[in-house]
Amino acid sequence: MKVSIKTPSRLHFAMLDLRGDLGRKFGSIGVAIDNPSIQLTAKPADSLNVEGSRPERVVKFAEKIMRENQISEGINIKIDSDIPEHSGFGSGTQLALAVGMAISEVFNLDYSEELIAVKLGRSKRSGIGTYAFKHGGFIIDGGHGINEQNKLPPLLFHSQIPENWRFIIGLPEVNSAKSGDKELNAFKKVEPPPTTLVANATHIVLMQMMPAIIEKDIETFGSAMTKIDSIFGDYWENIQGGRYSHPLIEEGVDFLVEAGAYGVGQSSWGPAFYGLVDKEKALKVEVALQKILNRVDRKGYAFSASPNNQGAQIEVRK
């Protein structure tokens, strides 16, 4: 038997409600994209053996599931390609789910993506990564009940993303990301947003973003993306040092606007940032952004990502 898995990445637009005065917190918005991705293969072996990137994390995820199920047999897990860590693509959740699903297939555990996410401590705040892995597409989750933060947020809305939309992504080599304890500390430091901010953001999502994706209206969807990113970028200004977490991200976002992107933003804490364009413009904008990210002593990478509308690809060969 051999199991092959290819994951999506996700772009995280925002968490809608950090107040919790209606009994729930967070509530996230995001999309699944086809690039970058984790490509993993797994097959039975005499012992647990891991090849490729992030071996310690793979072993940690694998041992937890195997120990819980009292699995004494072994498995070989090889990571053939990976998603950059701490860059805004949700690499930790995609790796956890890929490893968990591979073990489930090899040992016939019949685990769901949701169960793996909870068991491996993913989706404590946002469910976008889990639902991107399972479904792909455009996703809105319902956050957590105030006293139920070990549950996966419910999926409130899911839609296919038009196939001719492209996300131009910039990835500068800067240190801006937060994850784990750093992310938790950031949430503790900031005051809850005013009710008017949350109301404005959810109004945009309900009456612009959701209808636009259904009607395949790239202009309105992009406009809503930018508004949401600006609202929450300004809210996090004191934590990340500005609307964006690094001046080069801001410069890149401004360029994408000038280049005609319908919508722009920073994914999670960055450093990945994105612009929404149609397929015909993608290559031209990508090439120009690559030059901007590598001026003088800068280093960075620009690329185009297509929508992922099916989630992770899982192939099992007996």
Image (tube, rainbow, N blue to C red):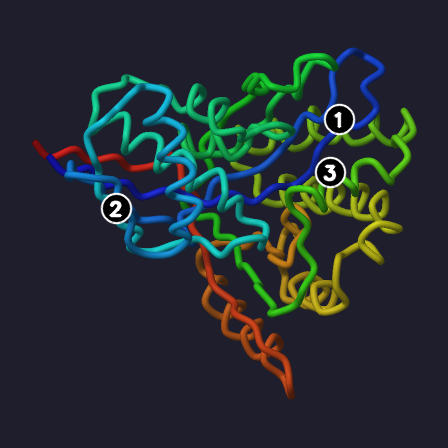
Q: Distance of mark 1 from mark 3, alpha carbons?
A: 23 Å
**Amino acid under disc 2:** Asn
Q: Which mark is residue 49?
A: 2
Work out whether residue 228 or residue 82 is closer to the camera in this orientation and state it. Answer: 82
Disc 3 is placed on an element classified as helix
Q: Quadrant of residue 99?
A: top left
- Percent position of residue 17, x then y: 77, 26
Q: In the rendered structure, are the residues bearing label 1 and label 3 in contact, judged by CB atoms less than 8 Å apart?
A: no
Q: In the rendered structure, are the residues bearing label 1 and label 2 in contact, judged by CB atoms less than 8 Å apart?
A: no
Q: In the rendered structure, are the residues bearing label 3 and label 2 in contact, judged by CB atoms less than 8 Å apart?
A: no
**Amino acid under disc 1:** Thr
Residue occupying image coordinates x 28% and y 40% = 5
Is tag 1's residue or tag 3's residue first in the polypeptide sequence? 3
- Percent position of residue 129, x then y: 51, 35
Residue 215 in sight in this render: no
Mark 1 = which residue? Answer: 202
Residue occupying image coordinates x 58% and y 55% = 87
Disc number lying in front (3 or 2): 2
Work out whether residue 29 or residue 101 is closer to the camera in this orientation and state it. Answer: 101
Q: In the image, is residue 22 above or below residue 169?
A: above
- Percent position of residue 278, x then y: 50, 53
Q: Quadrant of the N terminus?
A: top left
Q: Distance of mark 1 from mark 2, alpha carbons?
A: 46 Å
Q: Residues within 10 Å of mark 1 (few under 14, many from 20)?
A: some
- Percent position of residue 172, x then y: 61, 68
Residue occupying image coordinates x 71% and y 33% = 15
**Amino acid under disc 3:** Leu
Work out whether residue 89 or residue 117 is closer to the camera in this orientation and state it. Answer: 117
Disc number lying in front (1 or 3): 3
Q: Distance of mark 3 from mark 2, alpha carbons?
A: 32 Å
Q: Which mark is residue 184?
A: 3
